[in-house]
Amino acid sequence: MTQPGGFDRRLSTQVRSRIDSTNWTYPARRGVFPEVRVFGRWWSVAWLGVLGAIGLLSLHIFSVWLLEMPGGQAFVERYSGNPAVPLPGVQGFPEWLRWQHYLNLMFFVLIARAGIQILADHPRLYWNRHCTPGSEWFRFQIPVPTDRDWTARDDAVTLPGWLGLPGLRHSIGLARWWHFSIDLLWVANGVGFIALLFATEQWRRLVPVSWEVFLQAASVALQYAALQMPHDDGWVRYNALQQLAYFSVVFVAAPLAMLTGLAQAPAIGNRLRLVSKALHRQTARSLHFLVLAYFLFFVMTHVAMVFATGFRRNLNHIVMGTDASDWSGFGWGMAGLGVIAALWAVATPLTLRRPDLVRRVGQALVGRISLLMEWWDPKLEHAEQEISPYFWHNGRMPAGPVFDAQVQRGFAEFRLRVFGSVERPADLSLAELRALGFAEQITEHFCIQGWTGIAKWGGTPMATLIAHVAPRPGVRWVAFYSFGEGSDGGRYYDVHSLDDMQHVHSLLAHEMNGEPLPVRFGAPLRLRCENQLGFKHVKWIEAVEFLEDYHQLGLGRGGYNEDHELFGFHATI
Ligand SMILES: Nc1nc2c(c(=O)[nH]1)N[C@H]1C(S)=C(S)[C@@H](COP(=O)(O)O)O[C@H]1N2
Ligand SMILES: [Mo]
């Protein structure tokens, strides 16, 4: 429908109520087996298995030898492996602890699967914030091709549906709803767990109170490695190695997972210099992944040890809360694992059958938190020498004779159309826009897929444009319409709050790194809005509309990716 101002929005209203792999916008494309770069060369992580096996075997031989030496014997006699302090009053496993232990596993499984899915959207990890191709230390994708246009979306890989949640290539919108919603439940469970540990005496099991724990743990490790199981009584207390392992999982790894997760948010990274300096998104993302690796390693060894050290009693402890040696703990434990396995099996099919349900539940759980983060004006700027040598790009270029002709003539005839609920609608050339006001900023870009890059942007501050057109009272939203289409057809667009557009760094950019904005990066105009993820920075802007309400646009969710890829509207995390 043509607007009073003569602008045809051409937004797609095509609803996809369910997804199957044949109608998903991004056809399947496999990555490669994970690789790690060490000494400038890429090694398959399969070598880790070989190395691990050799390491374990050597450790075993060494420990057997050491325990036969007089010194080794004396060490193990002196440090038997138990924490020094007796544990008065702590015995057995109360019901809350057993349930929280179980829920923790249930949540972890879903969080890990959705997390791996998010990783697969940019299947590379870096220690530098520029994400320069070739500088990654981990990848499960081929080197970035240089012989063709390769967008960040081209880089995403498909995962098997049983592993990734939901597995499809570039299904990060759905994966994020799972990851963040279950995170909330997991954090609530963990906070409750820690509170109850300290409200009772149970913390004494987990928290070492003497440095001797390291010597005691070394003794346990030695005995385990020599396959001489120490005499333990987990009903009364953990041995020192267990204590350290459980302590590290609860009090180190879990908080680190939270911290490195939050540090990846644009609203935080572009606001807090401390986070941006010490824990920028790529460090945070790499550490977040290493924490996952640690959790997985822990779960595997933990389960192996439960079985190696008397599984019937161990399972009675943690499932039934009894110190018996009958089969009930094993039976109920397997039933509990069966429930988790069933949840595992239905998570992907459910997500594909009811994508909008996943989005709505996620929105209800975490929507408010991402909205809260819009309070902050992201003011952080970087120095010239921090500008990234390579900047990833994304999005489908506008096609067609009208746009091509504009490019040919250097956008000399381009007019930005500003309309909607304003006192003074405008049609502005690039020169007129520039005359309204010009600002430059060196900021970091955060794509939802995981990569970042720093660039200098020059253009007209949105606040200046807003003052120029004078929105009517009641205007709360600003929509940006691209010349280009989205991946599924229909015009690419996105909506921002008027408040966000008043931030110092909300900019209609027509320069990048001191040069006219290249077409690939959004010429004639692209938006910068630094507390939001990259997909909200509309490129190739043709028109801007001021609105009281945006629900009449497209599918009513406030943007192309919100409508078609189930992304959240408040993209601050
Ligand atoms: N018109 C349009 N604008 C778009 C997109 C798109 O697909 N179409 N992709 C967005 C996404 S997902 C990102 S991360 C940034 C990428 O900006 P860059 O190509 O300059 O790095 O552009 C955003 N703007
Ligand atoms: Mo993006």
Image (cartoon, rainbow, N blue to C red):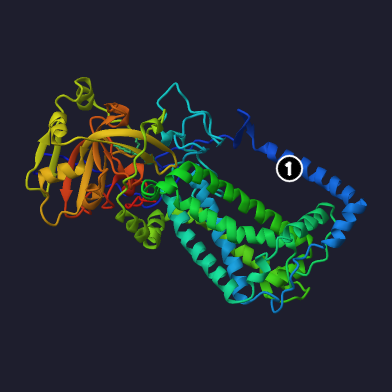
* Ligand 2 - quadrant of the structure image: top left
Which residue occupies 59% across, 60% down?
Answer: 251
Q: Is mark 1 within 8 Å of ligand 2?
A: no
Q: Nearer the viewer, residue 308 or 462?
A: 462
> Residue 1, how many percent across, how many down?
15, 43
Left-right relation of 51 to 382: right
Locate residue 310 relative to residue 101 in the image: left or right. right
Q: Please name the residue shown 43% across and 48% down the image.
A: 274
Q: Which residue is mark 1?
A: 52
**Residue 59 or residue 94, whichever sits in front:** 59
* Residue 363 seen from this side: no
Does 206 appear above or below 130?
below
Name the image quarter holding residue 203. bottom right
Amino acid at circle 1: Gly
| 9 or 144, nearer to the observer | 144
Question: Which structural element holds mark 1?
Answer: helix
